[in-house]
Every structure is written in structure tokens, then in C-alpha cells.
Image: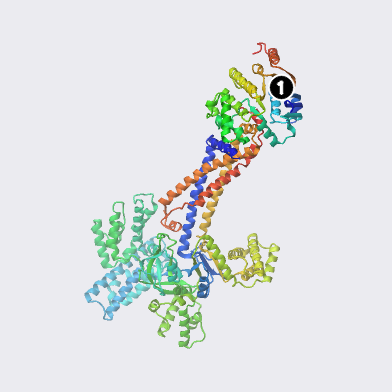
Amino acid sequence: MISKLVVLLRIAFANLFGSFLNFFVGAVLFFGAALLVVGGALFGTLDRSLSKSVVGSITGHLQIYSARSKEKLEVYGKFDGSDPNLAPMENFGELKEKLLKVSNVKSVVPEGTSGAMVGSGNTIDLTLEKLRSLYRAQKDGKGLPAADFKTQADSLKDHVKNMVTLLAKDMEKVTELGTKDSIEPEEKAALATTSAPDFWASFDADPFGHLELLENRIAPQVADADLLFIRYLGTDLDAYQETFDRLQVVEGEKVPKGRRGILLPRFFYEESMKLKNARRLDKIKDARAAGRKLSDESDKELQRFQRENQAQTREIVLQLDGLKTKTAVEKLRTLLGRTDGDLAALLGEFFKTTEQNFDERYKFFYAELAPMLSLYRVKVGDTMTLKSFGRSGSLEATSVKLYGIFEFNGLEKSPLAGAAALIDMVSFRELYGFLTSDKAAELKAMKEQTKARQIDRQNAEADLFGGAGDDSAAVVEAKEEKIAEITSAHGLRESAAEKQARVYTQAEIDDGVVMHAAITLKDGTPQAIAATQAELEKLFAATKPRPDAAVQGAVQKLVDEKKLPFALAQATRTVLEGEKQRTADPATGATDAQLIALKEALQGERARLDGKVYEALDKLLDSARPQVWVVTWNSAAGGLGQFIDVFRLILGAMVFGFALVALIVVTIGVTIATLQRTATIGTLRAIGAQREFVVSMVIVETLVLALVFGGLGALCGAGVVMWLHTSGIPAFRDELYFFFSGPSLKPDLDLAGLVFSIVTTLGVSVLAVLVPIFLAIRVAPVTAMQTSE
Amino acid sequence: MPNSIVSIRDVVKEYSLGKVVVPALRGVSLEVERGEFISIAGPSGSGKTTLLNLIGCVDTATRGTVEVAGKNTSALSERQLTQLRLDTLGFIFQSFNLVAVLTVFQNVELPLLLQNKLGSGERKKRVMELLTAVGIDTHAQHRPSELSGGQRQRVAIARALVTEPQIVLADEPTANLDSATGEAIIDLMKDLNQKKGITFIFSTHDHRVMKHADSVVRLADGKIIGKESADAAVQAALTSAAGRSPVGAH
């Protein structure tokens, strides 16, 4: 046996470099194996990195949400940007207690995602407010000395005048563009009035009347800092900060324990709240640091930043009052060597940056101009008013203090990780329109104080305002203000300041509804996640209703009569099978994934299904589902989590593609090699080699070929992976930070991947020798007598 | 123990070419004694190679009996025939048929490895003895492509003899060699035949090779037309050649 193996190996190794064909086949195996190792390492690391980003920033290892939800949980929102329609989970405290008893569960963090509008007030609003305060203080005798008052008032008036002038210019442009019909006549008239010199000459005679006209007619026309949309994650901030320890507050502080407050993601803060010109300058600086050149005409992004900075200087012009404008103009003229030009023109020239002057201008901007500007719309320590449409469609609002700016370690530049602000659970519930303990107490007190009938919050509004027919934002806001007025007058409602000062107990944070919850595990390996998911499903199996034989029978009939579309029928069969098992043993039954699949299939087919069929299947789901679904992080991540599936699919396709190409090439190569060696095989047979020897010869030769070239390819791939691990693949786009879980992807060499690539190469080669073997064993010994060397 | 090492009786071999049946041997009977140095002669297409194939167990007769070393080949399985070839027969091919990727030593060692009866040391000893006997020991580590035709045929002879077979079959062993080398090869085969008592059966149509044989079996049109002494056979061959060519025999 050994001696035969010696011959076989001898022939195999001797043939290895014996023909061009072997080199060709070997090259395919070499590159295939290298590709598998590199691809496997890349996608494996991407898989782990993405899961690290998702698990470590929002989802935890598992998520739970109400099984009554109309849609699947997607923590990053749906494809269209909206939030999935989830049913709230009541009594989170009890749920949390139950979950924490499971041995592998480390923490449970309540969560709920939604979006709100943030109103920071536009520049003219803010300036008019300053002007009003100045005149009011003067009127009340608490103002400044006359000279100081005049200087400040004139500066502020000049600032407003500037803004009005700019608006008037805009109006002219709009008229030129032929869209004058879209302008309200009242707006036009107000602009004409306020930009006339008479208006400003008579300002001091009736400052509050003039201010009213400006506030009511002019301010709404300035859209420089209108409402900003912000996504937020309502959570128990203490638990969140403890659980997701990649979170770092980089400016300000963490929200103190039990307090209401908001933390903004740095990415959002920089991208959306920073003065646009400053942000663009930062981006140009980063781009230059990365080797990009302002002089590069083909760099469309840098060219766009340049253009926008030169054209869009209004935000700065509007911010500066008369005094500051004067100062800025002087500084800019000195820098640019100019003796004339207004602020807008000077800024336009200032932002014409080049490779030569950029560093100087960047420094000048931050040293000379920025101190006069509000670089961010909201500053740490400010109170932000969030307005959101609650679950019932009513406009809800709450004010929260901005405690700090955060980022996730390694995900600093990721738009995804920096997409959602973090807000305390109590504020979230208020914004979402849930009856919080505060509101419940408030309504109870209102009822007692006003001796009203039995009312709830919505009825209270109807009672107070005579019906709830008009739900427009303005009306709702007015109602809110009225309620606040009444309740404050009666000492029933906490003021915003009182709310911010209040420290909520853990019970107050926990007791209430949440939309979903993140569960982090002590052991977060894929196997442990699956095992814990199964354990939790069993835990909640007790919350399932009793199996309903009648419902099962009705659905079985539909399946038997083939009344369901194929996919739906498959999903239904699986659930039916599970329900039948559960009838016999309550510990068994369909898994959450199977039930969710049926729910999804049912929703997908709803429009095509007969009403009764839909009802029967819905009843089956109703009788089979537990209180909550337990889903893995990648399922909870929705579309983003599907990237993992895409990675795996690509990897699978790569393996399949390589296997197919290798199979074809090796089959052809070895077949040709076998045909070319018919004489040798015939000779071997003639001199006494049995058929199995010939078969072994073909197999051993191919395996040696695969092992040598595939092994070399795998080693070479490993070398590439190790090099990539050392150098790292930089996240060349901000979006990639999240996928890479950091500024670069450092693929890890996976021993299993290495072995897998070699085994795949060998496996494919073994399959590929079937045809050559068939040919080889048909070579008769007599061939030796008929062939020439 | 009968003295015949090969016994062929009324053997017919036919090949089918589509619907046409082509007879290659038409009722051939032949006895070969142990230790004989016998030549099968005849013109091309006379059936020499077919007869050798049957004796060499690489082909089977359509009808009739072929007994090699006392075994009826038609009664043996494919596997048994292969084993019979390995243990009893040695082959020398017209085109040498050496394994190109192996060295001279490895080519000669190959049948021993297939037999798997000897240890490494014994194998080496026997291979080297044979290489020395055929005068090619200095080229043991060469590849066949580095050898001349005569040297290759010597390697082929060593390979055929290495398992100490009872019969060595040689199909036109000098056909690809020049006349001097051919003579030398036949001398070598004759020498081994005499020293080791191995039966040699070789086909040839070359009268210069034929003359070394103990006896010559002459074939024509698939039939044995005589078994005679080498001299008689050479004479007959020369006469036949002269009849075909006005220039005379060569």
C-alpha cells in the first residue's frame, strides 16, 4: 500500500510542473483559494464589524417588541424613512425583571425610536426678541444707561434692517424669475413697509408696534433656521450609557441619573446644527488632510463646497448685528487688502479659497469671525423644544435640556451611528403621546380642582375647547398652551424648569410603556445568541393563548383545498405543524421567526386574499403568538441587518463561483491530461497495474495539484489578509465607518477560513476527477501495444 | 509440470469494425517451451502483434484456448489477468513505453512497487543489478528523454525482467533502433535468456533479428504457416522479400 502510494506521489509530483495545462489549472486553483481566503476574511470581518456597530450602539444582541405590532421592528426606520408601526409593550418593569432572571441576560434597555422637529428660532426671531427685551427693560426702568442703550438698540435695528433689505432683494429676484404669483400680497406689502426709511425713522416712537409687524409679517419669511428634523431614541439613559459603553460624551456631560435630558450625536450636531460655512470649511480641511486638492477641478465635492461657501453667506450676514458687521467688514478688508465692499461681497471673496490661502483663511475664520457668530444653533446647556406627532396623530411637545454631545468610539464619522439623539424615557413617552405618570397625576388634579366630569386627556381638551375637530399643528399648540396656562394657574403642572430639575426614580422610568427593548448578553457568540433566543421564546411561550383546534381545523382546510398562494401556504403549514405539536406539548410550537414569517406573508398577500381566508389565518396567528417577539439584532436592524445577509450571499456566491469555475477548469484540464497520457496508462495496465491503481493515480495527481496550488493560494491569501490587517482598509466614505466599526477595516485571518478554502479546493478537485477517472479506467492494456512514445 | 509455458489451440481472433468482422487470427495453434527464444515473424498485418497480445493477456481470443503458465486466460477475470501479467510476464514495447516523468531507476522499480513484495533495499539492489546487466547503471537517475533509443530499450528490458517473469514478450523490439543497436539489444535478450532461462517471445519482420531465434513461427494472413529454425526462416524471408522487390532483399 505504502509502496503504491510512493509511486503515485512520485508520478503526481513529477507531473505537477510537467505541462502548461497543469500550470493553468494550478493558477485557477491558486487564485480561487486566495480569493476565498481574502474574501472570507473580508466579509467575515465586515460581518463582525457591522454586528459590533449595530449591537454596540443600539440593538444589543436581541430585541423584544410587542407581538401585536402591525409591522416588523426596524430600529433604523423603514426603507422610506418612516418608523414601523409597533404596538407598545405595557409594564416594562415586569418584563425587565422576568428577562433579567435568564442566566445569559446581562442587561435590558428600554427603547423607542421616533422623529421630532426641533425649533431653535430663526435669526430674525432671536434678534427681534433681543430688541424687544432691550426696549421692555428700558420701559420698565431696568435698562442700560441712555448712551449704551442707544448703541445697542441701533446695532440691533441695523441688524434687522439688513435682514429686511436682504429679504427685499430676494423678493426682487423671485419676481424676476416669474414666480411672483407665489408671493402673498400681504408679505410683499409688509416688506415694502419695513424696508422704507420712514419705518425705521419712526421706530422709537412705537417700538412694540413696529416689533409686532416685524415678528408677525417679516420673521416668518426668513427661513434660515427653520424646523429641523431629528431622529431620537427614547431610552433609560443610565442603563443605555452603562450597556453601550462605546458611547462617549465628547462635549458637555452625561444626563445625570434620573434626570430628563437629551444627548445629541456629534455627527448630527456637526452636520445639521453647525453654521454651514464653518462645516464646509471643516470638510475642506479634512479633504486636504486626506490628500485632496482644492485645485483639482475633477473633485466635484470640493468644488461644490467652494461654490456654496461663496454663494451662501447669508447665514453669517444675518447673524451679525450692526456693530459686529462693522468689525467683520474691517477685518475682512484688512485681510483681503480691500478698501470697499459690503459684508456679503467680502465674505464671498473670503471664501474663494485656494491651496495657497486655505490654511490662513481657515485660521482667520475661527480666530476672527467665529467668536462673533453662533457656530451651532443649539449649545450644550440650552433647552430644546421637541415637537412630534404622537401615536394618535396629535402634536406633542416637550422641552429638554441638551446635556452633551456624544459619539460612539470608532464610529465618530458614521452617519448611521450618529443618526439618532438619545432622550430620556419619560420625555419619549410624552412625545409619543403616552399617558405618563406625570400626566396621569396632572389630569387627576385637574379633575379635582375643576370639579369636572370623568375625563381623560383627550376629552379634557374637548371639554375645555368645545370639541376636537381641528387637529392642525397651530390649533394643537394653542390648546397645549391653554392647558399649560390653566394648569399652571392652578399649580397643577410642573414648569419646564421643574421638570428638568426633577429626579425620576428607576420605578418611574421603568413603569410604563416602551416600544422595544435591547437585551445584551453575557455571552454574545452567535451560538449563545441563538440559544438565549430559544430560551426567551420558551419563557414567553406561557403568554401564548391555548391552541385553538377549531382555528387550526379551518386553516388546515384552506391548506388542503390549496386556497393559499405558495409562500403563504408554506409559512402556514409550518405554523400549523407547530400549533399541532403545541396542543400535545405546551413547551413546543412554532418559533417566533416562523410566526413572523407567516405574519409577513399574510400582510404581503392581504390585498389578494379573500376576507374570510385572511381572517382565518389572522386568527391562527392570534392563537399562536406570544406577548412579545424575540428577534436577533440583525433582524431588528431591518434593512441594515440585511447587509449581513448580503455579505453572506456574496461570500456564498464567491464560493459557488469559484467552485463552478474550478470544477469546469479542473475537469477539462485533468481530462485533457488523462487523454494525453493514454499510452502511459495503457503501459501501466499492461505491466500489471490494476484499475484502482490508475484511478488512484488520477485522484492523487489532482489532489496534489489542488493541495500544492490551492495551498499556495491560501497561504498567499493569508499573507494578503495579514498585510491588510496591518495596514487596514480605510473607510473612504463616512458611511463605511459603521460597516467597518471604525475608521478602517482590519480583516482578521480566520484559520477556519483558511482550512475551508483548501478543503473547498480539494473537494472541487475530487468532484472534477470523475470524468477523467471514467476515461482512465476505460484505457485497455492493449493500448500500450498500439501507441508510440 | 508440462514443459509448455504457452499453449495456444485453435485460436481465432476477430475485430469488429462496424458491421464488418475482420479476422486477425484464423485458427492458430502454438506450443512454446520454457526457456525458448522464439521469434514470431511475418509481414505487417499477418497477426504477429495480435498473437503477442493474446499471449501477453492484454487481449482475449474470440474462440480457442490460450494457456499461459498453465492458466487458461479466457477463464480468468480482468483482475486475475492483470495479476498474471504482473507476476508472470514482462513486456518490451516497440516504442519503449517508459514513463517519461520518472527516472530510469524509477521506471525499472515500478513493477516491483506494484508487486509490493520486496523491501526498499532489495528493490534497489535488484534494480541496480539489472541496470548493470543491461549496461545502463550509470544513467540510473536520468529521465528517458535524456537517453538514446538503444538506451531506452535497455531500460525497457530491465523493467520487463525486474519481476523475474517466466515469459518476456517483445513486440518488434528493434523496430525503432538502428541495425547495430538492434543487434546489440537482441544479443542482450539472448544472453539473458541463456543465463536466466527466461522464455522470450518476440515479433519481428527483420531477418537480421530473426536469425538469433531458436525457432521462428511464421505467420501469414492470420495463420501459422510454419515453425522452423532461424536459418530456414531467414532464408524464406529473404526469398519472399526478393519476390516482392526487383532490387532484392535488404
Q: How many marks?
A: 1
Residue tagged by mark 1? B46
Q: Chain of mark 1?
A: B
Horizontal and vertical percent position of residue A444: 48, 84
| Residue A65 against residue A412 in the figure, above or below | below
* Viewer-closest of A424 and B26: B26
Quarter that holds the N terminus of chain A? top right
Visual colour scheme:
rainbow
- Where on the picture, by quarter, is residue A260? bottom left
Horizontal and vertical percent position of residue A88: 52, 72
- The residue sitting at the top extreme is B247
Numbered disc 1: secondary structure: loop
Q: Is residue A148 left or right of residue A505?
A: left
Q: Residues within 10 Å of mark 1 (few under 14, many from 20)?
A: some
* Viewer-closest of A315 and B138: B138
* Viewer-closest of A474 and A597: A597
- Where on the picture, by quarter, is residue A169? bottom left
| Residue A437 against residue A57 in the figure, above or below | below
Instruction: Using the rendered image of the protein, determine whether residue A680 is visible from the camera's viewpoint.
Output: yes
Q: Is residue A301 left or right of residue A543?
A: left
Horizontal and vertical percent position of residue A284: 35, 55
* Viewer-closest of A553 and A248: A248
- The residue sitting at the bottom extreme is A451
Quarter that holds the C terminus of chain A? top right
Identify which amino acid the numbered label 1 is placed on: Ser
| Residue A706 against residue A133 in the figure, above or below | above
Residue at (44% x, 63% y) in the render: A419
Instruction: Using the rendered image of the protein, determine whether residue A84 is visible from the camera's viewpoint.
Output: no
Horizontal and vertical percent position of residue A81: 49, 63
Q: Is residue A86 left or right of residue A171?
A: right
